[in-house]
Image: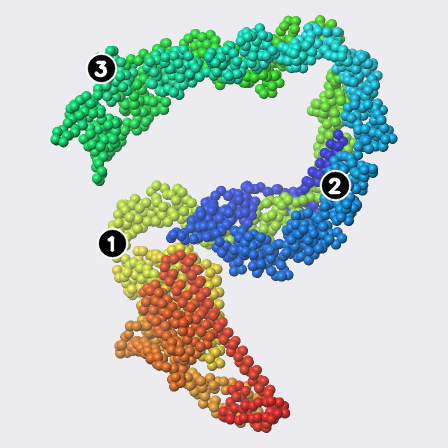
């Protein structure tokens, strides 16, 4: 008890400690935290935090999702963030598609609508395919077979490039890792193939990798790759790792380790030990042989295994047996093995199990009991010790008679040792109670057993009835009880005397010490075998007779074998074993035997005739054996009924046998005619589906011989013709044979339908006709003539297919026009005309289709159809005998050979319904096996119903005989009624079965459902019945089943009454009155309770006796006070109920008298108000206790509570006064919260949302709602606010505006959909889809979805997402209709869609209220797209169909509104071609539209805000707006624009670097780089002039090559203005033939405008040439003057500069004509040829003043067309000659850096030819981008092949430059071809970026090559300079005065005034010096 209380207290303490209490304001000590707590305020005067009086908990969440902010909301599957708040997620389709992705992670947008995430294959658009699928996997958009699909990403490189981490890639596919170029790639096969730490996680095979920081390598995470000297660290890597002291290694065998670091575990995980310099396995077997002690072996112990030494050295595991211990050391150390002590025997020098016999011989009994375990050994009769025994009687040494091996006490009795129990104190040594008590105080004497027994209250006589052997108080109460067998007189000596005392008693008999005795009675047993003596072997306690087997000298139950031999009948045998589940049958010679399971086990005829358990048997008189009955061994059979009774599977076989029904036909009509079927039972025996056939029906026979009368024979058989043959006796019916006739066919057919005429001829040409039987089927006929006569069963037709002819059956369903019933019936024997389908069908297929399944229904449409009962459908009647007698029919309607007959015998199928039967003999059952009943009053057969039975019946059995569904009826005139519920039966005569055939019983004048009777047949006990079927059950009369307990015991028979615990249904126990021989209820307890004598009880009832001594119970004492009751029994277990003592229980069970303490010693208190006893606890204390001290006085653990009373101090919250608010029951500190007037814990925890700022909280507003200033106890601005201070917003997001109260509100009408705005169409028009930023459809819209009307009201139709009036109804809806003339005809001014037609004007009539129209001629807008479809910059030409003028002076552009569909962002530039004015003219404008957003199939609409133009007739524009497609522009994303701008900027930088490096090369005299630069940039710049529809980003990029332009110079010099002046004020312009290129710089073919850069270049070149000549002349005289200056060292630097410039000028002057000028021409050839080809052949040679400039331009164009081609021709001719020194100067340009071989010499001409063809392709093949691309590809391939094969350039670096440039350019040109195809924009986009990359490669490669070339030159220059320095140092050793007067130029070694060279050689400081002057 104490332990339980302690555990409960500990559990309570644990629970209280685990509870966290919320913080209150009183817990806050910092002012800032207090002010941030909504629940609190800071009391300045008290300097503490108090709770605000007006605080209300605001944590009112309308829904689960309302508590989440946007980021948290979309993570919740149940929620979605929509319109600025978190709502419950229903489905994705409820969200707008543009807000879909932000609403929920479960949703994505497919570009059209919001949809649920699914599989990639579910995504049907590219936009959706770019999103993650439902498994968070990426998808890819692919094209296959011309269609696009969304598929799962299968390869790593298909994953997005924005994945930056290895785990992101592996999350998609395990085989992927991060790519260093962005995105993912497949993992390396080996870890060491990774070069970056970011990839070093797993290899391709998912082996773990790690990054070694020391080696900066990625290694596989295996032992050998890890460095560690710690075993545990290596184990973390791999359990198979250990360390060698430096790094981790793979585990080896222990013997392979050579250091203590490794020697921990071997490769199998077994322990190792480092012992004396070597590593050994840590097990006993590994110990070295020099170890021989337990201490040494203990070193090798592993886990729980103890090692012991071996005698020859080494160790072994502790063995299982002591004798396996080899040393004395181990034997003495290991004390026990398997519970056995070990003992070292010195004599034999072995260890053995310690036994009692090993004890010294001098040991006494006292010594022996301590030798092993207590009393395991005892002293023997001789010397020493012996093993103790398990029975005291086996102890022979009486000195050792103390305890046995099982620790049971022993005693010496009569010279032998016995167990100390009462039963061993026996007669005659103990003959009285005193004798037993003196020997053992717990014993008393039993006169029944003649022995001492335990002193139990029930065994004690009246004089002893005080205490039992356990000191429980005993008592004998007055009154009577039913007689008990053991209370009978000890002088009773017979079985009869005991039964007279109590029928359940028998004599107590036995033997003691060989002396028999009979005294008193004992209770009978349930089992006869329990009785040991014949005098007892009479019956069991239930009265079941027993049988004494004298041979076996034992009592047993009656069985078949011990039945008397006089029994001759089955009744006698069954009566013998009536209470047993045995079937006994008599034997032939008397007696009984058990019925065998099968017939073969029965040995005599009597048994065989009775039968076996499996069924009836047959006695074979021949073999004298019993056999199973078969159909074959039945004899003397007379009918089917007899055969069915013989064996159910048999039917009758005439004349007197039976046969198996499997061997005979089971059709009713096949019943044998030779048997008279005269009853329903006979037909049922033939077939259960048959009944008697009596009455009129149809029949026919298969053979003529089956007809037995002349009348029957008159009817033909089915096929044959029959005739009555009187020549026989008796006369018979026979078949007419066909062969009896020799006649024509008509005679044969008339003779019989199956006869046909066969015609044959002889050699003389004579024809013979014979009559023979037809063949059975058409397919057997081979002759056409016979085929035309048909077969026996089919009508035939002769058909020829090809060369093969054959006879076949005519089909019914052959197609034929004008088909009639006659035609159909004549087609084939079984054809039927179906009038419903007007088709010819077979009857076999038509009959089953009938829906009226009845006899009349089947024949209603076709008389040859009949009801088939087994299949319950209509079938074609195939046999006349299938007709029945209970249907009227005309037999000839079936077949012509069917005849009517009055049947007096035979069988037919059961009728579908009882009402079909016409005679009482048939009225038995219908085909459904439902019973039928012949109503005498109605005179017909009806369905059997219990309420319709007309007979007078008086018992339930009689009703059951008519129908198993009936019982007796007492309510109406009818005798029977339907079975119902048991409780509805009001009479006992009805109470047998309910409607479910469950048994009912009549109990207490009510009929109840008796579940007990549901027990299957068997042998039951009372306990089994109650356990299996309920406590209301008992056994039936012979215990073969169960029944409901009966009302009175008298209703039980003796067997039931004697069953122990038997009772009636009122649970009153029953007993058998032996005198009156009936069963009665117990009644002895009703006797006077003061009776104390047996005679008085017997006088009350002879079955009663006085009460016995028993254990005293509380209710045996009659005290009205608690004190005497508590003392009545030990442990105060009794209390009082005010009248007598009762068992003490809980306080709540006591009344006022016993309300003292409970059985658990809990104090109790009586509550007067509640009139009950309760535990004395704080909660039940009186309300008069007001203070803490008063409650403490009441109970120490209590404190006062508000309003009076006490409460237990558990937690601080349980304390209600400040005086007690110190600590709780666990001594946890408390604090008084003055604000809430409650005691709380000093320690607390805060929950976000409780209004109190706790730990790690910055604010708490008392709720968990977002966007109210505090969210998750962190400062959070309201939705739409950028920055705020508490609830006040300082700055709002875009789309919001700051209100006066510092809140952010959505700006409706700004076009931005933010916050709770559903839409924003930037207008305030209602019913246009969006109004006041809420979806609002047209007022007549019935189904509005996201502002789009899906269904309009009647009279309206959907139009532009809203409703508009139905055109043609005469009602003009001005907002939607321009007119409505009451019809939908075109051509009357108002067309079919109620729009004013072109050239018409409509006005609304005031009279008719409809539109009236008249034809006019209005000006019309004409739009023309001048751009290519993929250009992001589209040029739209606006013009009109006639001349127009402004209505008044105004600016045309101000009244134009341009809009691109889908609200696409764009830029607009309007360029006038012919401006609108006040005069009539053909006005034209160009609209340059640059689209800035990606959009599919955009359109632009150009609209006049108002009509400002009129035509000559002053008619205005009627259509103020027109729309035109903008093609399919390729629009780049912002990221791509940024990338493009970066790329362009980068390329511009490269170009400037390129220009800069080339310019530097010019300054140092290398003009080749400069001209190469010009050539390359021009080549690239003219790519843009191709007609190829470049994507916008590539087109924009190509403009970068125009960065080198003289346009700023032209603008400075006003060249364009000058040209305009020369052209008489007109801008020089000739329209380009290439209409595809509409850019101003591309569509002007005026030669001088395009070639002005060429002329400027040539001009600058000539100017430089003249400047160089001037410089040479000036520097020559200047150099002469400088030589006269003394201090040359100061002018040395200037001298070098002048010298370099002079050399450059000289070189330029010398080579200008043959080299420089040609190079300038070649580098400018692109522009020259383009300009010349562009104007060709548009030449104008007019010599008027206004045309002089155009004529001059034409001459220039023509000359520049001719001269380059002449130059090319001349150069080719010249270069064909052999290279020699004479023409090297004249044609040096062609030989500079060119190989001297033949084909190399043509490099320059070929380059010029390439340029000419390049420009010709651009200028002349502009009409076809495809041909242009192919031509250019051929050109580039040809030139590139020439360069690669010939390698014309001498310098390798220049050759590489040339090859790289040409190959890259060829790659670019080759890949232009796809732009001409209709490919996907994504492909075009990617291809554009590829081309940008290739152009970048060309520029970059040239710059790199230039840098390399310059670097090489600088290195070479540096080396030369170093050589010169060394040479200068060597000159210092020369001693020659002449040297100081010689000014040596160290660079060129030239002297200003001459060519003086100084050579020298210094050999040593003192050698001779040689000076050579030349």
Please tell me which residue is depicted at 53% across the width and 79% down the height of the picture. Answer: 1916
Circle 2 Cα neighbour tier, 10 Å, few/some/many (<14 / 14–19 / ≥20): some
Label 3 SS: strand
Q: Which residue is mark 1?
A: 1415
Q: Position of residue 1083 (x, y in %)?
A: 67, 9
Q: Do the numbered discs 3 and 1 sit on residues whose CB atoms are within 8 Å? A: no
Residue 1728 image-quadrant placement? bottom left
Label 2 SS: loop
Residue 1928 image-quadrant placement? bottom right
Gap in Å between the C-alphas at discs 3 and 1?
106 Å
Q: Earlier in the sequence, mark 2 or mark 1?
A: 2
Residue 1873 image-quadrant placement? bottom left
- Front label number (2 vs 1): 2
Q: Position of residue 877 (x, y in %)?
A: 30, 23
Farthest-out residue, bottom: 1937
Please tell me which residue is depicted at 50% across the width and 43% down the height of the picture. Answer: 89
Q: How many marks?
A: 3
Q: Who is closer to the viewer here, 755 or 1042?
A: 755
Please tell me which residue is depicted at 40% across the width and 19% down the height of the picture. Answer: 661
Quadrant where the N terminus sits is top right
Q: Who is closer to the viewer here, 507 or 1765?
A: 507
Q: Do the numbered discs 2 and 1 sit on residues whose CB atoms are within 8 Å? A: no
Q: Position of residue 227 (x, y in %)?
A: 66, 57
Q: Which residue is mark 2?
A: 318
Q: Which residue is mark 3?
A: 724
């Amino acid at each position: 008890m104490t332990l339980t209380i302690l555990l409960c207290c500990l559990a309570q303490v644990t629970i209280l400690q685990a509870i966290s209490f919320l913080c209150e304001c009183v817990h806050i000590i910092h002012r800032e935290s207090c002010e941030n707590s909504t629940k609190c305020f800071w009391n300045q005067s008290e300097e503490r935090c108090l709770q605000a009086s007006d605080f209300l908990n605001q944590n009112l969440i309308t829904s689960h999702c309302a508590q989440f902010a946007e980021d948290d909301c979309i993570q919740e599957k149940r929620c979605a963030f929509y319109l600025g708040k978190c709502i419950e997620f229903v489905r994705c389709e409820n969200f707008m598609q543009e807000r879909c992705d932000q609403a929920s992670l479960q949703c994505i947008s497919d570009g059209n609508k919001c949809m649920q995430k699914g599989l990639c294959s579910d995504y049907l658009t590219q936009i959706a395919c770019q999103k993650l699928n439902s498994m968070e996997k990426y998808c890819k958009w692919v094209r296959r077979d011309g269609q696009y699909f969304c598929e799962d990403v299968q390869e790593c490189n298909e994953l997005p490039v924005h994945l930056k981490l290895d785990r992101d890639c592996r999350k998609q596919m395990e085989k992927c890792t991060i790519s260093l170029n962005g995105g993912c790639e497949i993992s390396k096969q080996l870890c060491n193939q990774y070069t970056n730490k970011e990839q070093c996680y797993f290899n391709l095979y998912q082996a773990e990798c790690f990054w070694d920081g020391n080696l900066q390598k990625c290694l596989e995470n295996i032992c050998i790759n890890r460095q560690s000297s710690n075993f545990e660290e290596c184990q973390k890597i791999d359990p198979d790792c250990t360390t060698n002291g430096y790094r981790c290694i793979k585990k080896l065998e222990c013997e392979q380790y050579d250091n203590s670091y490794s020697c921990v575990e071997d490769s199998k995980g077994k322990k190792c030990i480092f012992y004396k310099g070597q590593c050994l396995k840590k097990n006993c077997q590994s110990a070295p042989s020099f170890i021989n002690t337990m201490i040494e072996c203990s070193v090798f112990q592993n886990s729980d295994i103890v090692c012991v030494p071996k005698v020859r050295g080494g160790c072994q595991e502790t063995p299982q047996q002591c004798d396996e211990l080899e040393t004395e050391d181990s034997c003495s150390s290991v004390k026990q093995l398997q519970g056995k002590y070990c003992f070292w025997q010195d004599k034999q020098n072995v260890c053995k199990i310690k036994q009692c016999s090993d004890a010294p011989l001098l040991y006494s009994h006292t010594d022996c009991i301590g030798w092993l375990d207590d009393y395991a050994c005892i002293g023997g009769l001789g010397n020493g010790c012996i093993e103790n025994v398990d029975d005291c009687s086996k102890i022979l040494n009486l000195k050792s008679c103390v305890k046995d091996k099982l620790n049971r006490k022993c005693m010496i009795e009569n010279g032998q040792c016995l167990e100390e129990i009462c039963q061993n104190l026996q007669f005659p040594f103990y003959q009285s109670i005193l004798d037993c008590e003196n020997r053992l105080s717990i014993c008393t004497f039993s006169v029944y057993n003649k022995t001492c027994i335990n002193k139990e209250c029930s065994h004690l006589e009246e004089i002893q009835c005080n205490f039992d052997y356990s000191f429980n108080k005993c008592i004998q109460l007055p009154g009577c009880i039913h007689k008990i067998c053991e209370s009978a007189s000890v002088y009773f000596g017979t079985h009869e005397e005991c039964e007279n005392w109590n029928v359940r008693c028998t004599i107590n008999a036995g033997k003691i010490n060989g002396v028999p005795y009979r005294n008193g009675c004992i209770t009978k047993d349930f089992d006869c075998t329990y009785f040991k003596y014949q005098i007892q072997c009479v019956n069991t306690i239930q009265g079941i007779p027993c049988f004494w087997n004298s041979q076996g000298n034992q009592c047993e139950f009656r069985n078949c074998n011990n039945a008397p031999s006089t029994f001759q009948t089955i009744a006698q045998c069954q009566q013998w074993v009536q209470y047993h589940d045995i079937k006994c049958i008599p034997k032939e010679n008397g007696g009984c035997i058990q019925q065998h399971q099968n017939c073969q086990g029965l040995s005599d005829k009597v048994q065989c005739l009775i039968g076996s358990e499996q069924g009836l048997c047959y006695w074979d008189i021949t073999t004298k054996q019993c056999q199973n009955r078969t159909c074959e061994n039945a004899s003397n059979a007379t009918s089917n009924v007899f055969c069915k009774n013989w064996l159910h599977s048999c039917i009758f076989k005439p004349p007197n046998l039976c046969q198996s029904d499997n061997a005979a036909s089971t059709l009713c009509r096949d019943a044998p005619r030779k048997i008279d079927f005269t009853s329903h039972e006979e037909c049922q025996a033939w077939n259960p589906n048959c009944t008697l056939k009596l009455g009129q029906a149809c029949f026919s026979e298969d053979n003529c011989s089956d007809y037995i009368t002349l009348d029957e024979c008159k009817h033909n058989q089915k096929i044959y013709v029959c005739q009555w043959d009187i020549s026989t006796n008796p006369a018979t019916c026979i078949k007419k044979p066909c062969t009896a006739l020799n006649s024509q066919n008509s005679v044969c057919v008339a003779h019989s339908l199956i006869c046909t005429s066969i015609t044959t001829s002889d050699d003389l040409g004579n024809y013979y006709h014979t009559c023979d039987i037809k063949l059975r089927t058409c397919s057997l006929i081979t002759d056409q003539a016979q085929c035309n006569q048909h077969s026996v069963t089919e009508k035939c037709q002769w058909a020829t297919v090809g060369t093969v002819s054959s006879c076949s059956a005519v089909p019914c369903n052959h197609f034929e026009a004008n088909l009639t019933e006659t035609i159909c019936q004549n087609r084939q024997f079984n054809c039927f005309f179906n009038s419903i389908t007007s088709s010819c069908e077979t009857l076999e297929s038509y009959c089953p289709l009938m829906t009226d399944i009845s006899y009349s229904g089947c024949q209603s449409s076709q008389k040859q159809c009949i009801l088939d009962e087994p299949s319950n459908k209509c079938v074609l009647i195939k046999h006349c005998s299938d007709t029945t007698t209970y249907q009227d029919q005309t037999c000839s309607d079936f077949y012509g050979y069917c005849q009517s007959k009055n049947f007096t015998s035979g069988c037919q199928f059961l009728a579908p319904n009882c009402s079909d039967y016409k005679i009482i003999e048939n009225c038995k059952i219908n085909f459904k096996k439902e019973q039928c009943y012949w109503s005498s009053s109605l005179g017909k057969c009806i369905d059997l119903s219990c309420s319709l039975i007309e007979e007078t019946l008086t018992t339930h059995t009689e009703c059951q005989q008519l129908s198993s569904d009936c019982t007796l009826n007492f309510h109406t005139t009818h005798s029977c009624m339907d079975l119902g519920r048991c409780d509805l039966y009001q009479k006992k005569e009805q109470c047998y079965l309910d409607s479910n055939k469950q048994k009912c019983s009549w109990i207490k004048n009510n009929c109840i459902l008796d579940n007990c009777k549901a027990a299957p047949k068997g042998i039951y006990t009372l306990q089994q019945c109650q356990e299996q079927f309920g406590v209301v059950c008992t056994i039936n009369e012979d215990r073969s089943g169960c029944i409901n307990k009966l009302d009175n015991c008298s209703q039980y028979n003796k067997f039931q009454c004697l069953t122990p615990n038997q009772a009636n249904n009122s649970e009153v126990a029953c007993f058998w009155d032996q005198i009156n021989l009936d069963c009665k209820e117990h009644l002895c307890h009703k006797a006077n309770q003061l009776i104390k004598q047996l005679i008085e009880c017997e006088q009350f009832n002879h079955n009663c006796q006085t009460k016995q001594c028993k254990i005293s119970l509380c209710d045996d004492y009659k005290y009205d006070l608690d004190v005497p009751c508590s003392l009545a029994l030990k442990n105060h277990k009794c209390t009082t109920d005010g009248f007598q003592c009762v068992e003490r229980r809980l306080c709540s069970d006591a009344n006022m008298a016993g309300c003292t303490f409970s059985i658990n010693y809990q104090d109790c208190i009586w509550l007067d108000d509640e009139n009950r006893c309760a535990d004395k606890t704080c909660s039940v204390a009186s309300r008069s206790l007001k203070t803490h001290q008063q409650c403490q006085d009441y109970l120490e653990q209590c404190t006062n509570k508000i309003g009076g009373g006490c409460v237990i101090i558990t937690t601080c919250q349980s304390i209600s006064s400040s005086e007690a608010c110190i600590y709780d029951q666990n001594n946890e500190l408390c604090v008084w919260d003055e604000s809430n007037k409650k005691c709380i814990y000093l320690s607390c925890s805060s929950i976000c949302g409780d209004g109190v700022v706790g730990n790690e909280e910055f604010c708490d507003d008392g709720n968990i709602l977002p966007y109210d200033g505090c969210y998750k106890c962190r400062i959070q601005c309201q939705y739409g606010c950028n920055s705020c201070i508490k609830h006040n917003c300082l700055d709002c997001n875009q789309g919001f505006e700051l209100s006066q109260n510092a809140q952010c509100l959505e700006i409706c009408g700004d076009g931005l959909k933010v916050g709770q705005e559903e839409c924003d169409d930037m207008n305030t028009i209602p019913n246009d889809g969006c109004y006041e930023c809420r979806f609002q459809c047209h007022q007549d819209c019935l189904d509005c979805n996201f502002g789009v009307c899906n269904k309009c009201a009647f009279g309206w139709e959907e139009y532009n997402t809203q409703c508009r009036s139905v055109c043609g109804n005469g009602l003009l809806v001005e907002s939607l209709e321009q007119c409505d003339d009451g019809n939908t005809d075109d051509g009357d001014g108002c067309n079919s869609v109620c729009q004013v037609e072109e050239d018409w004007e409509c006005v609304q009539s005031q009279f008719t209220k409809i539109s009236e129209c008249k034809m006019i001629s209005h000006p019309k807008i004409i739009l023309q797209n001048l751009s290519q479809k993929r250009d992001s910059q589209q040029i739209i030409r606006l013009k009109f169909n006639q001349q127009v003028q402004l209505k008044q002076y105004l600016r045309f552009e101000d009244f134009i509104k341009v809009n691109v569909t889908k609200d696409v962002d764009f830029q607009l530039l309007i360029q006038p071609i012919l401006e609108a004015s006040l005069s009539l003219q053909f006005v034209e404008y160009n609209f340059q539209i640059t689209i800035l957003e990606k959009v599919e199939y955009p359109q632009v609409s150009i609209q006049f805000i108002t009509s400002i133009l009129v035509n000559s007739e002053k008619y205005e524009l009627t259509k103020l707006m027109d729309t035109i497609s903008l093609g399919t522009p390729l629009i780049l994303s912002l990221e791509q624009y940024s990338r493009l701008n970066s790329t362009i900027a980068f390329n511009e930088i490269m170009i400037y670097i390129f220009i800069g490096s080339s310019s530097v090369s010019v300054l140092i005299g290398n003009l080749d780089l400069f001209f190469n630069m010009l050539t390359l940039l021009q080549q690239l710049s003219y790519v843009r002039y191709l007609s190829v529809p470049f994507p916008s980003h590539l087109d924009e990029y190509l403009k970068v090559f125009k960065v080198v332009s003289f346009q700023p110079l032209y603008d400075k010099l006003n060249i364009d203005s000058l040209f305009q002046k020369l052209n008489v004020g007109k801008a020089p312009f000739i329209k380009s033939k290439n209409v595809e290129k509409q850019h101003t710089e591309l569509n002007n073919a005026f030669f001088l405008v395009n070639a002005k850069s060429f002329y400027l270049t040539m001009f600058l070149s000539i100017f430089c040439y003249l400047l160089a000549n001037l410089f040479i002349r000036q520097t020559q005289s200047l150099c002469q003057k400088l030589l006269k200056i003394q201090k040359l060292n100061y002018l040395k630097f200037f001298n070098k500069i002048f010298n370099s410039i002079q050399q450059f000028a000289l070189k330029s002057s010398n080579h200008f004509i043959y080299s420089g000028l040609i190079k300038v021409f070649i580098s400018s050839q692109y522009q020259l040829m383009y300009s010349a080809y562009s104007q060709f052949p548009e030449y104008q040679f007019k010599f008027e003043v206004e045309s002089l400039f155009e004529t001059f331009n034409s001459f220039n164009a023509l000359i520049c067309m001719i001269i380059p081609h002449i130059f090319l021709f001349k150069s080719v001719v010249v270069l064909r000659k052999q290279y020699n020194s004479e023409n090297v100067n004249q044609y040096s340009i062609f030989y500079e850096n060119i190989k001297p071989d033949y084909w190399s010499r043509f490099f320059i001409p070929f380059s010029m030819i390439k340029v000419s063809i390049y420009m010709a392709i651009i200028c002349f093949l502009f009409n076809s981008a495809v041909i242009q691309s192919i031509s250019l590809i051929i050109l580039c391939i040809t030139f590139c092949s020439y360069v690669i094969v010939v390698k014309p350039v001498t310098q390798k670096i220049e050759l590489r430059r040339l090859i790289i440039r040409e190959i890259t350019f060829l790659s670019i040109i080759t890949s232009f071809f796809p732009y001409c195809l209709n490919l996907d924009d994504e492909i075009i986009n990617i291809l554009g970026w590829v081309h940008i990359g290739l152009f970048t490669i060309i520029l970059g490669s040239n710059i790199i090559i230039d840098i390399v070339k310059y670097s090489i030159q600088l290195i070479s220059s540096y080396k030369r300079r170093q050589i010169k320095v060394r040479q200068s140092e060597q000159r210092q050793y020369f001693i020659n005065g002449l040297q100081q007067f010689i000014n040596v130029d160290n660079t060129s070694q030239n002297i200003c005034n001459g060519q003086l060279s100084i050579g020298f050689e210094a050999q040593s400081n003192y050698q001779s010096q040689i000076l050579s002057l030349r």
